[in-house]
Image (tube, rainbow, N blue to C red):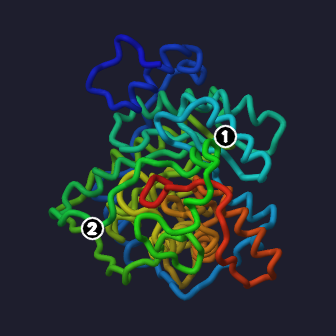
Amino acid sequence: MASADAPTSLTNSETLIHGFLAENPALDSELGKIEIMTDRYTDDEWASQITKTQKKVDVKRERKYNAPKVGSNEFAETIDHTVLKLDATPAQIDALCSEARTEGFKSVCVRLYHVPRCVSNLKGSSVVVACVIGFHEGTQDTHSKLREAGAAVAAGARELDVVLNHNILTKHNPPSPESTAPPLNSRDSTTDTITAANTAVNTRPRNGTSATEGPYSVQSSSPPPTPIVPTDPEEIPDYSAIYTELATIRSLCPSPTVLKLIFETSQLTPAQILAASHLAAAANFDFIKTSTGFNGPGAQLGDVQLMVAACEYLSTKTQSNGGSPMSGRKMQVKASGGIRSLEDAVKMLEAGATRLGTSSGIWIMQESRRVGEEGEGSRPGGVTRLYTDDSVGAEY
């Protein structure tokens, strides 16, 4: 699909996107001329506002939100059914859409070049199509992200999951030791659910990992919370560049297009998570999202709790918080990366997330129905998995 004249310096993902746009020029011009927004504040002014947010956000880690009833239609509608592998085939995309339609998931989340096929497959259903933008690095230039976003909306995507250029926030971070997280596995669990028939090998955890309450659950507990240290005034990131990019995407793709900003929380400190939350709210994004699933650990409980608290603070002006809301509406939180069991899903929803990005939606729904059959509060045990899942350490 790549065009012959695509620059050799592009990543594989960018090459595929350039090829798709070359083959579909109408999508590249559907929304008209792209204009970059001007900034609202200087970096110093942004830093002053963000420091206030960093000091004011109050995380009540013991708070538990009401999650939709396990196995209900509302529970299914929290799931974005996801395949983001570069080599996903048309047959796998067709099956992804079929599964989402059958289960009543909120969306299917795919790359740009799969959007038209998903839109066609899901016509007449309540399932919407979400498209990732700037995936997965987030370091693409703003113009490239805008072209991708505009083409996705023109092709029928109703939600865009945009990767933050988190390198701007981490530019001044001191070097850190290499991550001790397990290496990423190249397998994608949704791709497996729609291609594999062998279930016997899935009756035990993968790669020596231990189950945590769910039969195949990946450890999802968070480390002790890290103190939030406001931004050093001598090392202010280029907040204006981040805001300008986000605000321009919002201008190009106005409501009702739903915009989600992917933070890559594994790469950010708590203070940087709050800075990104502040800028997302200022740009009128609808969701903030934990991870791509391709870079370090995925959703962590503490990060979700912090992001939920940030959304509440940034949208609500009260006498006690002393703050002025950045947005008149409250952003929501999408937890993504490493959510592979019912236990993982419920923990994230009870932490305040309202959307889950996962390629294990089929298994989660199957497990939820089994729990419902055995009685509320019980857990399935010793079951044989109906779908192959070699996803430990893999994206989503």
Q: Amino acid at mark 1?
A: Val
Residue depicted at 64% across the width and 48% down the height: 197
- Disc 1 crowd rating (10 Å Cα; few below 14, some 14-19, many 20+) is many
Residue 356 appears in the rendering: yes
Position of residue 132 relative to residue 278, above or below, is above
Position of residue 378 relative to residue 77, above or below, is below
Spot the residue most to the top: 4
Mark 2 or mark 1, earlier in chain: 1
User: Could you tell whether 93 is left or right of 145 in the image?
Assistant: right
Position of residue 274 relative to residue 77, above or below, is below
Dividing the picture into quadrants, the one containing residue 177 is bottom left
Secondary structure of residue under mark 1 = strand
Nearest the eye: 52 or 142? 142
User: Could you tell whether 272 is left or right of 125 in the image?
Assistant: left
Nearest the eye: 62 or 246? 62
Residue depicted at 32% across the width and 68% down the height: 269
Nearest the eye: 350 or 273? 350
Q: Amino acid at mark 2?
A: Thr
3D distance between C-alphas at marks 2 and 1: 35 Å
Q: At which x and y percent is residue 301?
A: 49, 74
Q: At which x and y percent is residue 156?
A: 67, 31
Residue depicted at 53% across the width and 35% down the height: 88
Spot the residue most to the front: 200
Residue bearing mark 2: 180
Secondary structure of residue under mark 2 = loop
Q: Which mark is residue 129?
A: 1
Q: At which x and y percent is residue 324?
A: 51, 69
- Disc 2 crowd rating (10 Å Cα; few below 14, some 14-19, many 20+) is few
